[in-house]
Image: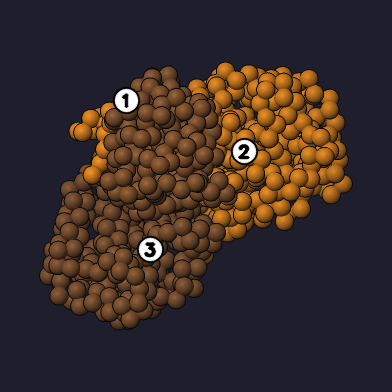
Chain colours: A brown, B orange
């Protein structure tokens, strides 16, 4: 990104985004795909430059003695850059949502009505130290015909400047305006506050990061914000469950990637099968030494038979997102008790049931209103890629606009088209 | 409404709404419909009380020398009360959106996925002096399983207290919680500000009123706000149009109800047909003595032939919502010029074209992204009732969540339901 472009006032960034958004909305699929493929190529062409910039960020992170996990998220390698380029190519291969026609109907008076998908307009994405978000989001925004304002953290500022530089060069070569993808390079946090007040130019704010970032956006934004990215997720094991399958579902939900928001937080077991099921699942979880925070009854059943148990702290443990190899375990005496417990403690991200009884399943599915409700399947499937959206911009746990995994279609709105033959209304 | 319920702190109102919303979400259609029909009956049963309360509001408005149009909106009569009751019965007769299943698919790995409609949760509706909004919104919220917080103006406070009293009595008799419909009766404007910050409890803010109310909500709310209710609407008359039908469409769009947001603001006429078309449409508009604010060329064609012409003020007239019998008139030399003009001046509410050439129509419909785009039909059709939604909570001109007329479905969200047979993800 050119030096003189790095300190444009936030308000001007917003105006520019709004101005180009009307143009982007009507670009052809071919033109958008050409731009995406050129960006992907440009990442390879500029690899040396991007990796050098990234090295500066990594060096700064080391100098600040940041934890290894942080640096791992920050670091780019030739292989990671290749993956980022391939992810962009995958977005190019997805169907273009813009222009899609749906809900067509002819009214009794002969008016023909349909809805036609249009872009949202301008997205603002605020994120932390993951350079791949820069290219992922830019690709999804472009494909869906939206302009995007990126606000990465100061930790990856050099990487982001290099990546956006490559994006701009590709946009220029394919005839799309550079302002389609803008980076706010001033790392002062005051700029984020300014961005969150740009309701005149920005249609949607998408925070990508931890709880505090989400809360900050929600509390300070006059623009609609997508809330999500946190989960305290439950699986309830019913007496009608196939217990061996339930063991595998629980094990997968807890250990396959414990640091993510669709991982399991609390296991609820019906008292009727706890005697059989708890030792089974504990034996499997022992392979990863998962710590179990148990209520008194679960503790009674496991004590002495499983080395990593602890009594749960009722004041906090049922409302904690573990992000690690810890699992809350609790006995319940009925489906109703399980439902009430989940309604009280879930963040409405991903909750599930293991059961065979269709009436039990239907009641659970009706009563639990989480963004995704799982029946005999791991909560880890709550993901745009897994759900067949091809890509994902966020997982929303709110109810306005979109809920659950958000793909390209969730970055669009629609217009109504009403065709008549001189129809009037008196 | 009971006296001791009238000054509950706004935060408590929000907490109560959130608490009952989870119950309302799972009420049966039968129970919700029974409540709606009982509310309708209760309006008749309490008519004397409601009309007496309304008389106090009307008297206060007279004392403040409010304009006749204002008092007309405020006043209730037995007949208007009857209409309000019938509107509630009409909502009861609409299909229940909650629980509707859509987007069902079986993934390649065998997971069965569908979406199921759920309520938004808690709505806050902020409105001005129209008591019918109180019952309309309460009915739409209940039917869609949402709790609602009503904030009417001080001008109709007695009417609203009486109406919400009748609603509460009906809710009690049908076993639904009174907190499903709450009125903030403290008329201090500071309460609105508090309401707009309740993002922990409220999912969506819907302003019903003029521009300043919408702007106030947008600028002060940390909750998503539905923007709308304003229109600077255009009709472009193409050389391919059937001119006699175009005259009727323009006449209807301008004069059938000039005070509403889907009325016509500016007429754009292709220069090629202006000679013929302008005198035709002017002759028709003369029946209502519509004032025409013309650009120089239109003025040249009409001057001396139409008594109510004025030169348009380029600095303001193309960006004014007339809300009366005034029409901007302008010649354009091409479809592109018409499109560019509309994109520059429309508020994206309702814009239309009169044309027969399918290529012209398709280009117009693709390029104009207003909430509703009309082809050979009056802009006045942009309305939930006219579009077959049965009822309408607002007309949105924003792009997030819903766009155009919002009916019951637009007061819902969805959850994903994912059913497997012990499916896990590694």
Q: Which residue lies under the disc numbered 1?
A: A242
Q: Earlier in the sequence, mark 3 or mark 1?
A: 3
Q: Say whether residue B44 is left or right of residue A22.
A: right
**Relative to B260, residue A130 above or below:** below
Separation of marks 3 and 1 at Cα, in angstroms: 41 Å
Identify the residue shown where x is 17% and y is 48%: A93
Return the residue found at the far front: A304
Camera-near label (3 vs 1) is 1
Q: Are marks 3 and 2 in contact (CB under 8 Å)?
A: no
Separation of marks 2 and 1 at Cα, in angstroms: 35 Å
Mark number displayed over residue A96: none
User: How packed is label 3: few (under 14 Cα within 10 Å), some, or many (20 or more)?
Assistant: many
Identify the residue shown where x is 76% and y is 45%: B8
Camera-near label (2 vs 1) is 1
Task: Respond whether the residues carrying marks 3 and 2 are from the same subunit.
Answer: no
Quick one: quadrant of the N terminus of chain A?
A: bottom left
Task: Respond whether the residues carrying marks 3 and 1 are from the same subunit.
Answer: yes
Q: Which residue lies under the disc numbered 3?
A: A127
Residue A163 at x, y percent in the picture: 24, 69
Separation of marks 3 and 2 at Cα, in angstroms: 32 Å
Q: Return the residue nearer the eye: A211 or A166.
A: A211
Residue B55 at x, y percent in the picture: 84, 35
User: How packed is label 1: few (under 14 Cα within 10 Å), some, or many (20 or more)?
Assistant: some
Residue A222 at x, y percent in the picture: 53, 58
Chain letter, disc 3 residue: A
- Residue B91 seen in the figure: yes
Q: Return the residue nearer the eye: B251 or A350.
A: A350
**Mark 2 falls on what kind of element?**
helix
Mark number displayed over residue B19: 2
């Amino acid at each position: 990104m050119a030096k003189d472009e790095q300190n444009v006032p936030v308000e001007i960034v917003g105006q520019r985004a709004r101005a180009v958004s009307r143009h982007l909305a009507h670009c052809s699929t071919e033109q958008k795909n050409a731009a995406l493929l050129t960006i992907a190529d440009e990442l390879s062409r500029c690899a040396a430059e991007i990796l050098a910039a990234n090295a500066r960020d990594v060096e700064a992170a080391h100098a600040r003695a940041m934890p290894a996990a942080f640096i791992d998220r920050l670091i780019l390698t030739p292989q990671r850059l290749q993956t980022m380029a391939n992810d962009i190519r995958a977005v190019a291969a997805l169907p273009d949502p813009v222009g899609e026609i749906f809900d067509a109907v002819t009214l009794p008076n002969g008016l023909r009505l349909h809805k036609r998908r249009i872009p949202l307009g301008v997205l603002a994405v605020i994120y932390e130290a993951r350079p791949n978000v820069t290219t992922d989001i830019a690709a999804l925004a472009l494909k869906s015909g939206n302009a995007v304002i990126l606000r990465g953290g100061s930790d990856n500022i050099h990487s982001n400047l290099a990546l956006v530089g490559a994006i701009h060069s590709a946009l220029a070569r394919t005839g799309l305006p550079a302002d389609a993808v803008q980076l706010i390079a001033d790392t002062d946090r005051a700029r984020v506050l300014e961005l969150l007040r740009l309701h005149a130019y920005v249609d949607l704010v998408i925070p990508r990061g931890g709880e505090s970032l989400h809360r900050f956006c929600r509390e300070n934004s006059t623009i609609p914000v997508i809330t999500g990215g946190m989960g305290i997720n439950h699986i309830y094991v019913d007496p009608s469950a196939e217990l061996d399958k339930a063991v595998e579902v629980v094990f997968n939900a807890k250990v396959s990637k414990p640091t993510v928001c669709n991982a399991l937080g609390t296991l609820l077991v019906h008292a009727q099968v706890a005697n059989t099921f708890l030792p089974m699942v504990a034996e499997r979880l022992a392979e990863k030494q998962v710590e179990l925070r148990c209520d008194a009854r679960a503790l009674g059943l496991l004590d002495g038979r499983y080395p990593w148990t602890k009594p749960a702290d009722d004041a906090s443990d049922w409302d904690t997102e573990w992000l690690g190899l810890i699992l809350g375990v609790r006995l319940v005496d009925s489906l109703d008790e399980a439902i009430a417990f989940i309604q009280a403690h879930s963040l409405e991200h991903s909750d599930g049931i293991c059961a065979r009884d269709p009436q039990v399943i239907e009641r659970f599915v009706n009563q639990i209103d989480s963004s995704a409700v799982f029946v005999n399947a791991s909560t880890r499937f709550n993901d745009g890629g897994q759900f067949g959206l091809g890509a994902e911009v966020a997982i929303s746990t709110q109810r306005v606009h979109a809920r659950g995994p958000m793909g390209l279609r969730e970055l669009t709105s629609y217009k109504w088209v009403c065709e008549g033959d001189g129809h009037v209304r008196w």
